[in-house]
Image: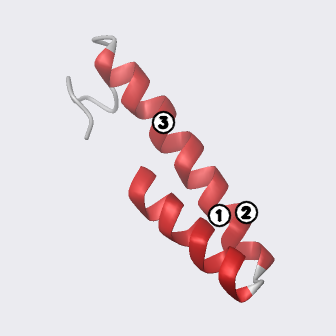
Amino acid sequence: MIVLGIILLVVGFLTGIGILWTIGIILAVIGAILWILGSLGHAVAGRRHYW
């Protein structure tokens, strides 16, 4: 999810499409939050690890 967010950020920046930029930021932030929760040992969506 983080990688997809970064890809959308780059594509949105290069093409000037604002919605891709916004979606990329949202996906990167959600991916980072899920990664942090998973690394702290919290079950995320029923899974012990998230990657």
Residue 21 found in image quarter: bottom right
Q: Up-down: is 41 above or below 47?
A: above
Which percent across, then down, holds residue 47?
22, 29
Q: Residues within 10 Å of mark 3 (few under 14, many from 20)?
A: some
Q: Amino acid at mark 3?
A: Ala
Q: Residues within 10 Å of mark 2 (few under 14, many from 20)?
A: some
Q: Are marks 2 and 3 in contact (CB under 8 Å)?
A: no
Q: Residue at x 79, y 75 (%)?
A: 18
Secondary element at tag 2: helix
Q: Are marks 1 and 3 in contact (CB under 8 Å)?
A: no
Q: Up-down: is 18 above or below 32?
A: below
Q: Are marks 1 and 2 in contact (CB under 8 Å)?
A: yes
Whole-number angstrom distance, CA of label 1 to CA of label 3: 14 Å
Residue highlighted by disc 3: 32
Q: Amino acid at mark 1?
A: Ile
Residue highlighted by disc 1: 23
**N-terminal-most mark, 1 or 3:** 1
Q: Residue at x 33, y 33 (%)?
A: 45
Q: Amino acid at mark 2?
A: Thr
Which percent across, then down, holds residue 35?
38, 31
Whole-number angstrom distance, CA of label 1 to CA of label 2: 4 Å
Residue highlighted by disc 2: 22
**N-terminal-most mark, 2 or 3:** 2
Q: Residue at x 40, y 58 (%)?
A: 3
Whole-number angstrom distance, CA of label 2 to CA of label 3: 16 Å
